Image (cartoon, rainbow, N blue to C red):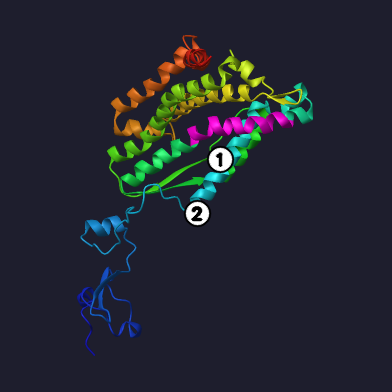
Amino acid sequence: MGRRDSRADILDDDPFRNQRSAPRIHRVHQRIGADGTHHFETSSSISGAILQFLGQQNWEKPKHHTGRLWHFSDIEKQNLRLAMGAFTLALGLMAANGVWGIRELTFSTWVVKILLAMPVMFIAIGPAFLLHEIGHKLVAKKNGCWAEFRADPQGLQFGVGIAFFLGIVFMAPGAVMVAGLVTRRQNGHIAVAGPLTNLSLFLVGIPLWGLILGLTGAHEHLATSIGEVFGRIYLTDGALNWKAMLADAGYYWLAANLFLGLFNMLPFGPLDGLKVKDWSERAFFAVLLIFAIPMFTWAVGVWSPFTVLDAVASPLSSMIR
């Protein structure tokens, strides 16, 4: 019985494969389906990149986003709710100085302080985190990528634990997961979208909160120092000091967006700054300075969120009176 030329395996399957040893050439096999379509299959351990380099094009092309930019899947909404809930709880614990706050207050007052601080933090700092991530998501989808937020359960647990025991917030709530083929420039645009969202919120927050505080008269309750903010108790003698809550929300809005923007522009690890710097060092240093200069001048006493909000709110309040 004659032997089958092994080179024939390139063109067609061996009908007697089960009766003899495996063919020597097994990189690509052709078969014809019932509908007459020619199929090419690989049984090699060679990586897809090498096969593509050798000319094989039978791998599936990446699927790009074609739906609405503002679409959020059910699992993404669930992850966003989980992250926002844990983040807000951690911020409430921070406002109450964690478990150490019980030494300064009664247990019931400590609990009330946490519960009342949580909505303030949710309104003021929640958008800084949430819209930062949505900024990444929208730009990624605009560039044809799949992008959805996913919470990090371990990061949330660790962050809440740190806030409870130490009274500080150090948390990685999660991030937008991006999949797709993008250029270095597009990846830089996706990364810088988050900090630029924080910059926009900071700039919008000055007239927005100035207007709110001026119309309500809450600017008179603006604290003069960070220590005074953390020492607030919004419930005194059974009365809710909602004006102080509004004043603190305005302060936290400005402070949080500046801090988150600067922190995320650091060129380390998974932070946005490293991706932006990889795309354009000029853009990286420009955006970094946009956040660093206000933070530095605030630290040396040139300005503060208190003075800025009061400067906007006071004239408006005087006009109303």
Let me know if residue 113 appears in the view. yes
Residue type highlighted by circle 2: Asp
Residue at 46%, 9% (x, y): give it: 302
Quick check: 297 above or below 159? above
Q: Nearer the viewer, residue 240 or 321?
A: 321
Provide the major secondary structure of the magenta segment. Answer: helix
Q: Which dot marks residue 296? A: none
Image x and y of residue 87, in percent: 58, 37
**Apparent side of residue 276 relative to residue 151 in the rendered image (left or right):** left
Image x and y of residue 180, in percent: 34, 50
Q: Quadrant of residue 107?
A: top right
Q: Nearer the viewer, residue 192 or 249?
A: 249
Residue at 69%, 23% (x, y): give it: 233
How far, Cα to Cα, is label 2 from label 1? Answer: 15 Å
The residues colored magenta run 111-129
Q: Nearer the viewer, residue 248 or 189?
A: 248
Quick check: 156 above or below 76? above
> In what quadrant of the picture does the N terminus appear?
bottom left
Residue type highlighted by circle 1: Met
**Apparent side of residue 139 relative to residue 250 in the rendered image (left or right):** left
Let me know if residue 170 appears in the view. no
Image x and y of residue 6, in percent: 23, 76
What residue sits right under mark 1 in the picture? Answer: 84
Label located before the other in sequence (2 or 1): 2
